[in-house]
Image: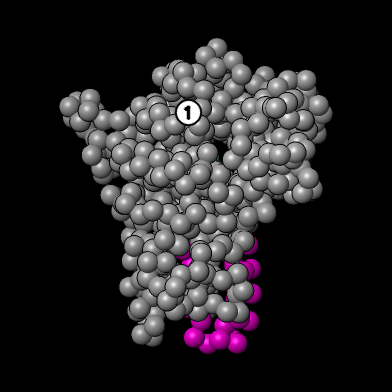
């Protein structure tokens, strides 16, 4: 359950898994599509699948059957890239059997390395950045005509607002909706602004339409995705930093307003969002969350470090005290809110004392869950240019281990407090361990497993919690 120094940013079992589009009549070619990294990347793969489906492709889980292999990559930490390089080596054997096979690298690693990837990885035919997926059909044509193809242009406008994503490998109950792209924050450690470009928000009407269609298809939960959702601002399209005039700002839709619009689609549609940024999270958003029962009472609020000097070096735009004030606001306005975080161990020049500040802050908040990482220096970032990556590897590992151990205890404590309580659980699927058990989540995003009886995926079930582990609540339905 706990994330260490790699890229288990979402369900580890899904990392790299090939995904399927329903077979299309008349489809002539087969695509094998693998995705790595964050939810945003998985959401992008659904856009890629949609574009290729419209161009006569079906998908396969059998790599040997593929005409095209796409790997949608992550560049957030070095080991994320090494894992993809490992996969590319494995594709080589397949290409030997099928010399006409086209191999394409998409996403953040494609954007970071650009045409260098073609030189470094000889078997790659196609390199496409996150803003250029509409160009995939014509790039594939170029490759068929014997050329290598690259499009890594970042866009000021692109939000793929009009493309209906093909829902890949999901449970039919929960779906992601991308509400914005890029990031303007320039945290010192982070490669995202370089790989995903400047921040732009998607037309709220297209977001509400997508949520409505999902609800009509039987989905019961949407997660609104962005690198910094609190910064969402739609004033007719284009870059956020170009929304200048008072008039434009007055007429713009902010995140609290968007959240309310999506919540109003149906009281039976749960709404989640990720990721919130401590410097931008407003009380207005918290009040909207408190007002609507169907907005899940859960906030992922990455802290990165509990020490103010580190936070300043990281260019996060807040101090320990500011962060604590935001947590207090959550507790005051939404008393039953689940809170999780991201933490980086061993950022440049971090001392033992500063590391301890992270531990004390974790205890002060009492996080329900955390994603925890060792600092990994990334080319071009502010930290790479200005600071030295001087915390020895073994010290980083020891600090990470301490953080992970503390969080394990905090998660267990948090779960123990829920034993004896009753929660409304949205059932997502059958439990992985037993077909007689169902698995779903509480509003606070905790996983609950309970005996199936007559219930099925998509049902809201009242469950009394009888026991727990650090990762899961175990209960029994009390619905009639
Ligand atoms: N936009 C989100 C935010 O600001 O919190 C998260 C973006 S990133 C995809 C997810 C997490 O990866 C970050 O919160 C951070 O903890 C971690 N991360 C980013 N760059 C890193 C690096 N160079 N080394 C280690 N962890 C990193
Ligand atoms: Fe990276 Fe910071 Fe933007 Fe998050 S907010 S994507 S950590 S630059």
Q: Which residues are magenta?
A: 82-111
For the stretch drawn in magenta, the main secondary structure is helix
182 drawn magenta? no
In the rendered view, would you say 204 is above or below 267?
below
The location of residue 278, given as percent across then percent down, is 49, 27
Q: Residue at x 42, y 76 (%)?
A: 26
Secondary structure of residue under mark 1 = loop
In the rendered view, would you say 260 is above or below 53?
above
Q: Is residue 247 left or right of residue 475?
A: left
The location of residue 129, given as percent across then percent down, is 41, 60
Q: Is residue 411 visible?
A: no
Q: How many marks?
A: 1
Q: Is residue 411 left or right of residue 165?
A: right
Viewer-closest of 220 and 404: 220
In the rendered view, would you say 132 is above or below 319?
below
Name the image quarter holding the N terminus. Answer: top right
Residue at the far top in the pictured view? 332
101 drawn magenta? yes
Q: Residue at x 71, y 35 (%)?
A: 448
Viewer-closest of 361 and 167: 167
Rendering quarter of residue 56: bottom left
Q: Is residue 308 left or right of residue 412?
A: left
Q: Is residue 435 visible?
A: yes
Rendering quarter of residue 247: top left
Q: Report which residue position mark 1 lands on.
A: 267
Q: Residue at x 33, y 66 (%)?
A: 135
């Amino acid at each position: 359950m706990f994330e260490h120094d790699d890229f288990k940013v979402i369900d580890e079992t899904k990392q790299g898994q090939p995904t399927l589009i329903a077979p299309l009549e008349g489809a002539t070619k087969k695509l094998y599509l693998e995705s790595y990294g964050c939810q945003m990347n998985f959401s992008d793969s659904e856009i890629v699948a949609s574009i290729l489906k419209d161009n006569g492709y079906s998908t396969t889980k059998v790599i040997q059957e593929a005409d095209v292999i796409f790997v949608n990559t992550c560049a957030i930490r070095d080991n994320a890239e090494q894992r993809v390089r490992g996969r590319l080596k494995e594709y080589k054997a397949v290409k030997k059997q099928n010399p006409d096979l086209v191999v394409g690298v998409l996403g953040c690693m494609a954007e970071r390395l650009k045409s260098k990837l073609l030189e470094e990885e000889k078997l790659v035919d196609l390199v496409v950045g996150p803003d250029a997926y509409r160009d995939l059909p014509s790039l594939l044509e170029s490759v068929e005509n014997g050329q290598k193809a690259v499009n890594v242009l970042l866009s000021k406008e692109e939000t793929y607002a009009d493309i209906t994503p093909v829902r890949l490998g999901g449970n039919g109950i929960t779906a992601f909706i991308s509400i914005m792209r890029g990031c303007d924050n320039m945290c010192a450690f982070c490669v995202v602004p370089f790989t995903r470009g400047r921040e732009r928000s998607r037309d709220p009407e297209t977001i509400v339409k997508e949520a409505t269609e999902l609800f009509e298809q039987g989905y019961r939960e949407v997660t609104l995705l962005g690198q910094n959702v609190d910064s969402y601002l739609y004033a007719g399209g284009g870059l956020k930093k170009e929304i200048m005039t008072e008039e434009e700002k007055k007429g713009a839709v902010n995140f609290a307003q968007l959240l309310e619009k999506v919540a109003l689609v149906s009281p039976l549609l749960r709404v989640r969002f990720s990721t919130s940024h401590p410097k931008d999270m407003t009380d207005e958003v918290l009040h909207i969350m408190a007002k609507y029962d169907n907005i899940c009472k859960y906030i992922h609020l990455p802290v990165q470090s509990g020490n103010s000097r580190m936070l300043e070096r990281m260019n996060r735009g807040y101090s320990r005290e500011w962060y604590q004030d935001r947590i207090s606001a959550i507790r005051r306005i939404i008393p039953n809110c689940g809170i999780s975080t991201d933490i980086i161990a061993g950022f440049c020049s971090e001392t033992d004392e500063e590391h301890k500040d992270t531990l004390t802050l974790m205890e002060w908040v009492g996080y329900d869950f955390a994603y925890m990482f060792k600092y990994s220096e990334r080319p071009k970032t502010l930290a790479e240019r200005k600071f030295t990556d001087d915390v020895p590897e073994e010290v980083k590992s020891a600090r990470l281990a301490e953080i992970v151990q503390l969080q394990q205890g905090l998660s267990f404590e948090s779960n123990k407090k829920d034993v004896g309580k009753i929660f409304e659980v949205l059932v997502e699927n059958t439990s992985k361990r037993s077909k007689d058990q169902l698995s779903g989540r509480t509003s606070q995003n905790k996983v609950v497993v309970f005996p199936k009886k007559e219930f099925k995926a998509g049902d809201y079930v009242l469950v009394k919690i009888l026991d727990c582990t650090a990762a899961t609540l175990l209960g029994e339905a009390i619905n009639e």
